[in-house]
Amino acid sequence: MEEASPPWFSAWSIKFSEPISDPRLVAAMLLQKRKDERWLLVGHPAPVSERHLWSVWLALRERALAKKMISVSLDGEFIRLLAGTHQMSVAFKRAGVQAGDEKAWLIRLPEWHDKDDEILLNHDNGTHDSEAYELMSWLESEYIPERPTPSNEALNRLQIESDLKDSRNTIEEMLMMQLSITDID
């Protein structure tokens, strides 16, 4: 039986007009122009698949509903979980945008409802496209039509050591396993 593909996550690959010289300035611009904390930027190689993004979102949702987030914000917690660490400073170094980056992912975290509601992984069908393009303009970037892909660059950026770096499935599996053990004491 073939496994079904998850829907697209609300993530837009963007290319900056020039490499980032000051990540804090880029982050400040996004914070100033975004309408809520569900918008964030992550380093381009960090997310490796739709399944990876949805898994991080589900882990975020679980922690937010249980009031067990380490970060004080949804965007920070998503980056922390994506990076697979307890430490926020490490999370931003691994999964945030960095000096020299030419590309990033502009992400809109999907909404969720109460614990009792059924979880539905719905693609937003372009609901946030206009807001995404407005943010791209403020960030002096342009949309690149691509989706997250497993890569050795992602493993390096997230500081994951492995000698099995060439298998796309293995990379995704390693990141999913790291996510599942992120908050185990």
Image (spheres, helix red, strand yellow):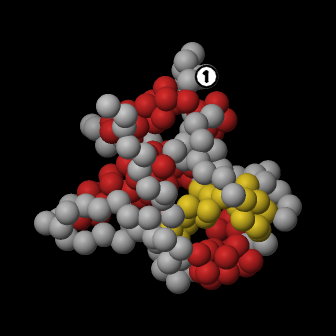
Quarter-wise, where is residue 164 in the image? top right
Q: Is residue 24 left or right of residue 122?
A: right
Which residue is drawn at the image coordinates 41% and 50% (left, top)?
A: 6
Q: Where, quadrant-wise, is the C terminus in this rendering?
A: top left
**Above or below, 76 relative to 169:** below
Which residue is more in the foreground, 40 or 53? Answer: 53
Write the residue at 53% across / 73% down: 126
Q: Is residue 162 above or below residue 42?
A: above
**Which residue is most to the front?**
1
Horizontal side of residue 5 vs 28, given as left or right? left
Q: What residue is at 76 percent from the left and 67 percent from the top?
A: 142
Front residue (pair 31, 15): 15
Number of marks drawn: 1
Q: Quadrant of residue 176?
A: top left
Q: Amino acid at mark 1?
A: Asp
- Horizontally, residue 103 falls left or right of residue 5, namely right
SS class of the residue under badge 1? loop
The residue at the point 29 percent across, 62 percent down is 120
Q: Residues within 10 Å of mark 1 (few under 14, many from 20)?
A: few
Q: Position of residue 68 (x, y in %)?
A: 26, 58
Question: In front: 93, or 62?
Answer: 62
The residue at which mark 1 appears reads as 166
| The one of 26 and 120 positioned closer to us in this rendering | 120
